[in-house]
Structures are given as structure tokens and as C-alpha cells.
Amino acid sequence: MSRPDAVVVGAGPNGLAAAITLARAGRSVLVLEAEDSAGGGCRSEELTLPGFVHDVCAAIHPLGAASPAFADLPLADHGLEWVHPEAPAAHPLPDGSAAVLERSLDATAEALRRDAGAWRRVVGPLVRDWDGLTGSILGPMLRVPRHPVTMARFGLRAVLPARTLAARAFDGDAARGLFAGLAAHAILDLGKPLTASFGLTFAASGHAVGWPAARGGSQKVADALVSYLRSLGGGIETGRRVGSLADLPPARAVLFDLTPRQVAAIAGDRLHARARRRFGRFRYGPGSFKIDYALDGPVPWKAEECGRAGSVHVGGTLEEVVAAERDVAQGRHPERPFVLTSQPSRFDPTRAPVGKHTFWAYCHVPHGSTVDMTTAIEDQLERFAPGFRDLVLARHTMSPADLERHNANNVGGDVAGGSHGGLQLVARPRLAADPYRLPIEGLDAYLCSASTPPGAGVHGMCGWWAARSALERLEARR
């Protein structure tokens, strides 16, 4: 392209969603990706042994299935097939039982026994109002919600700490533990306000749309987005690292699928001083320590129902999960970490040779941690799946530094594009009516990464909103 209407820097799901939104509006778009392949947090590789396909970062995509940005794209025509496990998630408990988040709200509630009514009261209204809810939570918060009653009902509980809501709403360890595991996706101290919002959102999404994976690996999500973009006439160049504004080709608008730290480095003094100060204060969250396994068989969970779940949250009781995440938030490495796991080969046989399995596990650690958490993770797995270590054929570990080398947006191992704690849940990367617009002198620029609302997840909504903002100005100039 001699001069595209827009250049997008970064080919993660948000950058690709932004490019597609612009291309569908008739704009010429060029995407520049620093790495040799597109995908960002949606890449798959044979990390352990030949024939074992592992998701390097994201593996399960609850918000991908719920995303308005993806809903009307013909991604199935470009190779993407969502595969749903029998149950979205499970949470094993120390007594050998497990709480299971089923697709059915009623089935989940009934299995929770004395908390059946409470689960229906807390989660049921969100499932019924799911379409209205997603339209509000998957976008900028500083706007009048299209469904104010739905958001008000959600907000009454969402503002609470997850620990408080779980303890108040539920009586049994099963419901409390299940909710704690869902809320721990926030990567925050679960004693802090607003962390209940994550538990509520993930619980409701499991019932409303499920927690699918991409058949063949998360790379298929990125590949389908790239294929569709090219069918619209969009261009993409890999191996094109942008280190300064001088590296950008001429364009009417530039969108960055990067975090504030990288944008500040690229823009230099041309970034408005106030924004530069704000970006300097932008908080990155805890890191992650991740292990990918090639296994000789399925994980031998004590609670057999865990084998039906796409995700298994290994952490024990509410109190144990809260203690582990509090340790991380306070800069300590928990002895018994909360471990997020998935065994996609149980419901997607393309991931491993016949009779073998892939397994994915990670825990939260302090930002930039250099501690090897392999033993702590495997001790937790052995606690709930005795004999796990005997099945390991090979393992591949990734520290926070490894995660950042793989994807520069994972600053200090933070896979969420910045902390979701406190005001930064809504002020990403700064408090503004249009949080996507970047004040860069002489450049119509936008931020479209997970550092903008609605935040982390493979949903493309950050790119979708940023592209809509860019389109408004492009149309106005026309």
C-alpha cells in the first residue's frame, strides 16, 4: 500500500480486530507485527515433543464466544472452529469432591445442594440478561449503559470483594471455592473491592455461552482473523518491529496494539507531557509462571468430574485461594499457589498423538519474579491428582521474563496488559471520555490493546472500540 488509511502496530487479537473493523468500513489497512507470526497471546507451538500442540499463552476463551467484535465475523469460513468441553470449569476441593460449573445453570445449582437457591439468585439474573450485560461490561465504563437496570443489578454485587460476596452469599465450601476460582482470573487480591465482578462475569459466561477452545490450538483464532483481514484487502507484514514513529509508513491514522510503556517509548517527546506522566504511572500487575506438559494419559483427578471440564481451578477452599492471591499481591510466592489448568486434548484430539495428552498450567507470581514455581505447582497438582508426575513425558516452563520475550505486551509476565485493580479497572490507561485516543503531536493515534477497556481476554473488543473511535475522526475529516 502506498499510503494506507490506517496502520495497526501489533497483530494480537485486538490489533487484528481493529484492522478488520476498519477494513469492513472500506478503509485500507496495513498491520505491522514485530514477531515472525501473528497472534500475540493467541499462538500455538510444539513446545514439548513432536505432535503435541500447546497454547503458548491463552488457551480457553470464554469472552471470545461472547464477543460482539467476533459475533458477526465469518471466522468459521476462515478455519476457526470453537470446541466446547462438556463442562466449562471445575474446582476440586481438599476432601476429594469437586464443584463443577456446568453449561446448565440448574444443573450447577442442584449439585451445590444447600447453595442451589443462592447460586440461582446470584448468577441466574446475569444469565437471563447476558446480552444486555455484555454490551456494557465489554466496553468503556464512562458512558451511559444501554441497559441501566441490568448494570445496576450487576453492580450491586460486582463492587464487593470476591471474598466477601462468596462468604455472604454461599454457605458451603463447594460454592465458595467455585466462586473464588472464577474470581481469581482477576489476578488481584480477592479481598479488594470490585473483584467479585470477575467471578460474576465468568460464572454467567459459562452458563450463557460456554468456555470454548479453538480446535487445533489458539493459533487458529489469529489465523482466521488474518485470513479474513486479507480477504477484505488488508495487508499484514510480520517481522516489522516499530521502535520509533520514524518506523511508521505514512497513514491517516495509527493504532497501537501495545501497552502504555511501549507507546511512550515509541512516541518519545511527541506524546503529550500529561499523558507521558500518566503512562509512567500505569500499573502492571503480577506475573505468571507457566508449564506446558506432554502427558502419557489424562490427569488422574481424585474428583473424576474434573475430567469433563475445560478448565480446572486448583486451589482448594475459598480461604486457600484468597491467601494465595493475597501473597502474590503483596510480593510473596505462595507455598500453595492457585493454579489454573486446562487439558484441551480431552475434548480436542488434534492436540496430541493418540492416547497422549497436552496439559497447560500456570500460577500467579509477583511482577517480574525469577522464582521457579515448578515444584510448588506440581505439589498442588499431586494434592488433587495423585500420580500426576508419573504421567509427565516432557515439560516446558515459562517464567515472567520468558513470557515477556515471547510477547512484549506481557510486561514483567503480566498477561493482562496492566493491572485491573482499583481505578485502573475503568481508567485504562487513563480516565477519559475516549480512552483509546492518544495525544501524540502530529499523529492521529489510538491505543487498541488490553491496556484499554474492557481489558484482558481474547475478545477483540479493545480493538473494535478503538477502530470505531478512529473511524469517527476519519469520516469527519472526509
Image (spheres, rainbow, N blue to C red):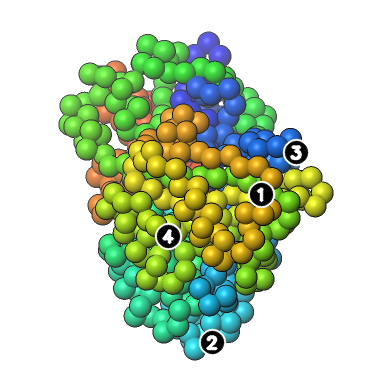
Classify residue 135 by image quadrant. Answer: bottom left
Where 200 falls versus 237 (above or below)?
Answer: below
Residue count near mark 1 (Cα–Cα under 10 Å), binned few <14, some 14–19, many ≥20 = some
Q: Is residue 160 above or below residue 66?
A: below
Q: Disc 4 versus disc 2: distance between alpha carbons?
A: 28 Å
The residue sitting at 55% across, 45% down in the picture is 291
Q: Position of residue 266 (x, y in %)?
A: 33, 20
Crowding at dot 4, Cα within 10 Å, few <14 / some 14-19 / many 20+, comes out as some
Dot 2 alpha-carbon crowd within 10 angstroms: few under 14, some 14 to 19, many 20 or more: some
Residue 364 placement (x, y as % from top left)? 41, 50
Q: Position of residue 80 (x, y in %)?
A: 69, 44
Mark 4 or 3, nearer chain start = 3
Foreground residue among 58 and 150: 58
Along the line of sight, the residue nearer the viewer: 284 or 80 = 284
Closer to the chain start, of discs 3 and 1, is 3
Q: Are marks 1 and 4 in contact (CB under 8 Å)?
A: no
Q: Which residue is under mark 2?
A: 113
Q: Residue at x 66, y 49 (%)?
A: 392
- Disc 2 marks a residue whose amino acid type is Arg
Tell me if residue 470 can be seen: no
Label for residue 224?
A: none
Disc on res. 392: 1
How far is the residue under mark 4 from the one under mark 3?
Answer: 32 Å
- Whole-Å distance between the Cαs marked 1 and 2? 36 Å
Q: Which of pointers 1 and 4 lies earlier in the amino acid sequence?
A: 4
Query: Judging from the image, what secondary structure is the residue with disc 4 in?
Result: loop
Given the current orientation, which residue lies at the most extreme right position? Answer: 354
Q: Quadrant of residue 323?
A: bottom left
Q: Are marks 4 and 2 in contact (CB under 8 Å)?
A: no
Instruction: Name which residue type carries label 1.
Output: Val
Image depth: mark 4 or mark 3 in front: 4
Which amino acid type is shown beneath numbered disc 3? Gly
